[in-house]
Amino acid sequence: MYLETSEKTIAKGNKEVFEFLSDLKNFEILMPDNIDKFEVLSEDRFLFALKGMPEIVLERKSQTEFSQLVLGAASEKLPFTLTADISDKDGSETDVKLSFEGKFNAMMAMMIKSPITNFIGALSENLSKI
């Protein structure tokens, strides 16, 4: 299953946006309003839970300085990645596109498509808080 948001333009340079996203504690600011729990576990891991959903631990999988950050599920039960692609526009503005990719059976994909779409949409909208 692959989902992506449209590009969101942020009035900051790509270095500033990348550094904000690289500090995983800042994801608490980006979380949707229905966040139930958020906890930084280490420099490369955080846990979050949305109301009515199980806790999920995300960890940094890879990053390319100033252009991409890839987070992934720490558990193999739900294998997925959340990628932020960061593109410099003109030094003072940056485009960010979020994408979600997971390997799920058809039944699971059908059940989680709507909540995941809403989740990454909320993260994208909240990027304006950077």
Image: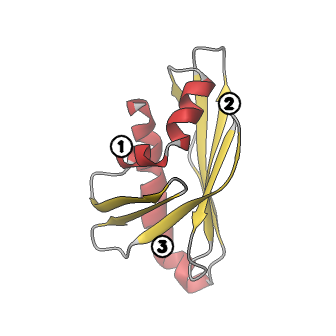
Q: Position of residue 54 (x, y in %)?
A: 37, 76
Task: Please provide percent x and percent y for residue 73.
Answer: 56, 68
Instruction: Identify the residue shown where x is 36% and y is 49%.
Output: 28
Residue at label 3? 112
Q: Determine whether the residue tagged by mark 1 lies in a helix, strand or loop.
A: helix
- Proximity of marks 2 and 1: CB atoms separated by less than 8 Å: no
The residue at the point 35 percent across, 43 percent down is: 29
Figure coloring: secondary structure
Q: Is residue 8 visible?
A: no
Query: In 3D space, how far apart are the residues under numbered discs 1 and 3 (Cα atoms)?
Result: 23 Å
Q: Is residue 36 placed above or below 90 in the rendered structure?
A: below
Q: What amino acid type is highlighted by mark number 2?
A: Ser
- The one nearer the camera, 71 or 45, is 45
Query: Looking at the image, is mark 2 or mark 1 nearer the viewer?
Result: 1
Q: Position of residue 38 (x, y in %)?
A: 33, 59
Circle 2 residue: 87
| Figure quadrant of residue 17 | top right
**CA–CA distance between discs 2 and 3?**
28 Å
Q: What kind of residue is marked 3?
A: Ile
Q: Amino acid at mark 1?
A: Ile
- Which residue is at the far right? 64
**Hey, which quadrant is residue 46 in on the image?**
bottom left
Q: Residue at x 55, y 56 (%)?
A: 44
**Which element type, helix, strand or loop, lies under badge 2?**
strand
Determine the residue located farthest toward the front in the rendered image. 42
Is 85 situated above or below 101?
A: above
Q: Earlier in the sequence, mark 2 or mark 3?
A: 2
